[in-house]
Every structure is written in structure tokens, then in C-alpha cells.
Image (spheres, rainbow, N blue to C red):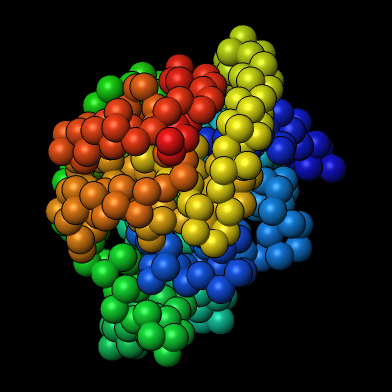
Amino acid sequence: MVLALAVVATRAIWLGDPAADYDEQLYSLIGLRWLDGALPYADLWDRKPAGLFALFAMAHAVGGPSPVAYQVLAMAFTLAGSLSIYELARPLADRWGALLAGIAYPLMLPLYGSHAGQSEVFFLPLLLGALYLVTSDREHLSFRRAAWAMLLGGLALQVKYTALPVCMTLGGLALLRFHRQGVQPDYLAKRALFFAAIGIAPTVLTYAIFAALGAGEAFWWANFGSFFLREGAGRWRGELPIAMIPILVSALLGLWAAVRLAPPRDSVLYASYALFAVGLVGTVFLPGTVYLYYLAALVPAAIVLALPLFASPAPLARVSVLMLFGFYALFYVGLDQAGKSADRRASVAHLSQAIAPFVDRDSECLWIFDGPSVLYTTTDSCIATRFVYPDHLNNALETNALGVDQSGEVARVLATHPSVIVTANDPLTRQNATAGQLVRNALQSDYEPLASAKLGERTVQAWRRR
């Protein structure tokens, strides 16, 4: 009950916020349009695995088109992650310490953009569940438990492929336990192959389904081919070093506590958790470009490393934990997250009301060159391109990674004369100059201002065709 209350308390601020962050707007849109018959990759393009879109589709099938549908599902997954942290902590901490660790999980996630429906919210509980299966029985790891853990890892891959380093770590931990239980090397090799097969089975099955629907090539390119062609912007840049401070402080305090205050009851188990944390680091830094929200995957890494701090009865440890929690509380209160969410809701509503009379689901389409993709949903507009996420057509890093000419696709969309075009005054990424100039030329010659609104630090502008 306490953990459930913690999850609700830390996420209720954003419940119903249609633009709480960027990416989940796209996942929601693809999930909704999938329910209407549009196929991911073939009709609406993105690199994320189909399992993620399926989660959003299921949420909307049950809860309707409102963002509340997937946000409630995200709450359920966050609670699952929190409970997993609690259970993982119990062998190393008393109930109070484990409870603090479980509360830290939903408390820290919003610091890194996982406050609404980011993919990390959905794949991290699967990985934590797999870790629990591999480590919870300290006497004997059964083959069945290990196989279920590998399946959870495979399902995590169908939410985000960069979970691969953690999946490999979990497989390695399972094999190490089997080795210690006396399993012979030839059987270990067979089990390793079997575990790998279980792990990739969900992805192979998904590919087979899309191939049967005639979209196998589109699936393969979006999921794998394009990944290696996207230009990298760097893994350690901008605000990332500063954003790492809460994670590093938590982890380092935990390691200090393990050495100075409260050596772990089970050092082998703690070492297993540390290896899991290393796998999560690999997950974050595997892509050539690291964004702030990727760091959410380090939240459970920091917590499992900090377990000796949560477990220690020493007053200094308790004070350290309270100071950490106080810092997290500043994020919610000091940065006025509730006020910012209210402003976003008002801005999206204003833009939606202005745009809706000029678009429909047939031929009068909205095109968002830069801005909140949730406007496709709130205006119930048709979509002029399968590259529906604005970043895919305006970001210079995507120039050679779409399978089509980026500027050529922008020109093609403009040639359809969208009824409304949405732009923003402050780009989020390095822009394709040619594509941007094409849009500016079209706006100058064929469009007039319709409405504008502030979203965060940016001004989003809607333009109506003359």
C-alpha cells in the first residue's frame, strides 16, 4: 500500500497531461492509429520495437484516446518496478530499508523524464523481475526460473532494444550460478544457446507477424537497418554530467556504506546486483546519442548499489537517505511541476481548438514539422507522411537514416498542401537546413498565422493555408 501511494503521489501531477514529454506522444499516436488499421513501420515509422506500440494500443483499447490510458498503465509498471526493488532489497535490508529503496524508485524516475510514458517505465520492471528470478533463491537456481528470466529479458527487448546489455548480463549471471552448482561446461554452452533463443524469440515472432502482413522489410529497416545509419551526437554532452549527480551520489554513498557502515549480509548477492548495474550502464550508453531520459535506466542501478545505505541503522546513513529524498522533493515542489503541467495542458488545448476546424481524417491534413505530435490525436487529423514524428524530418542526424531522402520527403509533404502546418521557434536538435528552408519558403508564400502557444521554453506556431 505504501509503495502504491508513493507511485501515485509521484506521478499524479502529470496524469492527463497530453504533452508531459515528447516521445510518448508518438507511441500513443502509433498505438491509437494501429487500432484504426495503420501498421507501425509501414504506415507510421519509428525505430522502437512493436511491443512498445502494442502496450500503448492495449492501453488505448481499454482506456480510450486520453493520455490517462497509457499513464495509468505506466503507473502499474512503475508499481511493479517498485515492488521488485523491495523484494530485491529484502535479503540485504530490513523491511524499513527495503521500503525506502522501493519508494526511491518512483521518486527518482521523474528526474529523468520517466514521469508519464517513456519506454524506460515499461522495460525496467521486466529486467528487475528477471533479476529477481535469477537471484532470489539463494540455495539453488532452477533451469525453469532462469528460462522465465530470459523470457522477461526478451520481452524487455521488444520494448527497447538497448536493453540488450542487461539481458546479456542476466544470462551471464544465470550461467555463473549454474557453474557454481556443478553444471558441466558442455551443458552450460547448450543452456547459453537456449537462453539466447528464448531471449530473441519475441522479436523473431514479431518479425514473422509483420512479414505475414507484408511489412517485413519495413520492420527490418526501422528496427535494425536504420539504427546504424543515424549520426551520433555524443554520449556525454550538455546537461548529462550534471544530471548524473543524483545517480552517482546515491551509488557512491551505497558503496561507501558497504565498506564503512554496513557490509552486505550476502556479498555475492550484492556483487550480482552490481553486475546488473553495470549492464544498465551499457544500456544507457550503447546508442551513439544519449538523451537525458536514457538516464532513467540508471535509477535501479543506483538503488541496488545504495542498498547498504538503506539497510544501515547508523544515524549517518539515515540522515543521508533523508537528504537524498529531500533533494528529490525539490524537483516536484521547487521546480513547480504542477504549474508547468497546467500550462502545457492549456497550450495544447488552445492549439487543438484553433487547428481542429481546418483538418479532417480524409484529405485536409495537419503536418507537424516541429511541435507536439499529440496534436494529431487531439485534432483527429489525417497524417500526410509516415514519418510522423517531427524529429525524423527536421533533425540533421536523421538525414541518411530514414531510407528516403529527408529533404525530398519534406518537399513531397509540402506538395500535398497540408491544411495546417505547425512549427516551433527554437529547435530541439541540429536541424536539416535544406528541409527548414523548404518549410519557411512554403509558409511565406502559401500560409498565414493561425495560433501560437508557449510549450516550455518554446513558442509553437500553427499556420493555416491561405
Q: Quadrant of residue 397?
A: top left
Is residue 200 toward the left or the right of residue 314 in the image?
A: left
Q: Nearer the viewer, residue 136 or 160?
A: 160
176, above or below 388, in the image:
below
Q: Quadrant of the C terminus?
A: top left
Is residue 8 toward the left or the right of residue 269 in the image?
A: right
Q: Nearer the viewer, residue 404 or 162?
A: 404
Q: Quadrant of the N terminus?
A: top right
Q: Quadrant of residue 208?
A: bottom left
Residue at image point 66% right, 25% down = 346
Residue 258 image position (x, y, % from top left): 48, 32
The total number of labels drawn is 0
Q: Quadrant of residue 96?
A: top right
Is residue 66 toward the left or the right of residue 358 in the image?
A: right
Residue 404 image position (x, y, % from top left): 20, 61
Report if residue 110 is visible in the image. yes
Residue at image point 34% right, 22% down = 426
Residue at image point 29% right, 32% down = 445
Report if residue 31 is visible in the image. no
Residue 351 image position (x, y, % from top left): 58, 31
Residue 58 image position (x, y, % from top left): 66, 65
Q: Nearer the viewer, residue 226 or 348?
A: 348
425, above or below 263, in the image:
above
